[in-house]
Amino acid sequence: MRPALITAFSAGILTSIVSPTSKAAVVELERVTLDEGNVTALLETTSQYYVDAMRALIEEGYRDDYRAIRWEVLEDAMRDAPVARFEYRFEMNGVPGMRVYHAMGGRPLGSVAKTIFEGPTPPGTPDMPSSPMSSEDEEALFSRRLASVDEVAVDLADARFYANFDQINVRASLLASEDSELGSFIVDGKNRAFDPEFKALRAIENDLRSGSLPRGGSIYGSVSEVTCTSCQYVMKRFADTYAVDLRVSQVYPTLPRSAERKLLASGSARMRGGQLIDAVSERPLLAADLLNGAREGQVRRSLSPRAMERNFKGTPWARRSFQLGPARFPRVSESSTEGSPPPRPRGSNNPTTGC
């Protein structure tokens, strides 16, 4: 699809880094704006691993019916948490190999589910979806952090819910910071150790140090959002320490105005509900829009009350919230001629997941 335009609109940022070893490592960050290549499909697959795991966790630990607002918070948490997919490519005895690390940002799924399904019912009702919680209500609900809860231990206990990983595709779990050359920071009030790209790099580092991966490889990654300054620093630190080249595609949420105007003027694109869509197929052109719509579809297909054969406690289906109706959204990996409905607005800071 319009290779010349895609080349012009996807800006790459290249930074050379001098390693303390004899090899000069490189960190390359590329912005993905228009849907190109297979970045959206790969990140959608990563998201599905976590949606499936959350379903298994709820089936085991939360068999009761719950009020609609709890399901809505679950939907928001699983749809909005950023995801990352990092490939570590290497050679062993002359044979090429690869291990793929999948990560979702935020606290472990066990902690997310505990926050959502245990404790007082969040404010709000299914009859008033247009009345969001106040900032004070959100803080009261989501800032409950038991000091005794070890998030690393919770993440380890969650491992049994991830049934679809294997020797090639692995989960980047939350790891303790001891014996690591990588350190995270607090940026915009958030602990960046919970960012998916940080989790992925820590997991790769752990495997390199343990010897389960050979050194001297390279990393090709993709992230569903723009990386923060803390994670950019960690990438440089990783490249410096382990002499590994990193090339990471980050899904950028907007297109430059000039590029958008060119597409509209050419007649190949038009606007629909604030989204830039293909004039013929009516499929969203931005990678971010496609990925967001696909992830919302995943959540509704797998984690809605109807999908899990649940009822709203004390609320008939006729009064259910606008957010939780059954929907079948086309996957990014399906035919490119299918359209995806516009996703609902995404919050910039989900207190449930910590992202």
Image: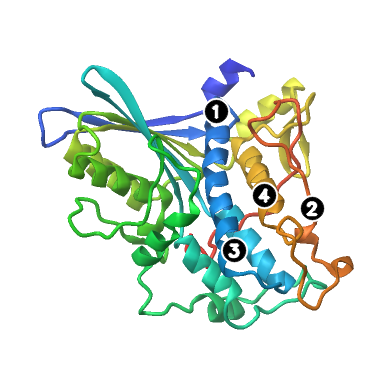
* Type of amino acid under label 1: Asn
Q: Which residue is mark 1?
A: 38
Query: Which mark is first along the chain, 3 or 4?
Result: 3
Please give the residue where the numbered disc 3 appears in the rendered image. 58
User: Earlier along the polypeptide chain: callout 1 or callout 3?
Assistant: 1
Task: Tell me if mark 3 has few (under 14), some (14-19) or many (20+) residues whose alpha carbon lies within 10 angstroms of its own.
Answer: some
**Residue 351 higher or lower than 238, as above or below:** below
* Residue type beneath disc 4: Glu
Secondary structure of the residue carrying tag 4 is helix
- Rendering coords of residue 225 (x, y %): 50, 45
Q: Which mark is residue 296?
A: 4
Labels 1, 3: front one: 3
Q: What residue is shown at x 19% (from left), y 39% (from top)?
A: 211
Q: Position of residue 233 (x, y in %)?
A: 29, 47
User: Is residue 340 visible in this depiction of the protein?
Assistant: yes
**Sequence-first tag of 1 and 4:** 1
Residue 175: x and y in percent read 31, 57
Q: Earlier in the sequence, mark 2 or mark 4?
A: 4
Label 3 SS: helix
Q: Nearer the viewer, residue 91 or 10?
A: 91
Q: From mark 1 to mark 3, how far is it between C-alphas?
A: 31 Å
Number of residues whose C-alpha sits closer than 10 Å to that of mark 1, classed few (under 14), some (14–19) or many (20 or more) = few
Q: Residue at x 68, y 66 (%)?
A: 71
User: Three-letter amino acid code at disc 3?
Assistant: Ile
Question: Disc 1 vs disc 2: which is toward the camera?
Answer: 2
Q: Which residue is mark 2?
A: 326
Left or right side of 161 for 16: left
Residue 80 is marked as: none
Q: Amino acid at mark 2?
A: Pro
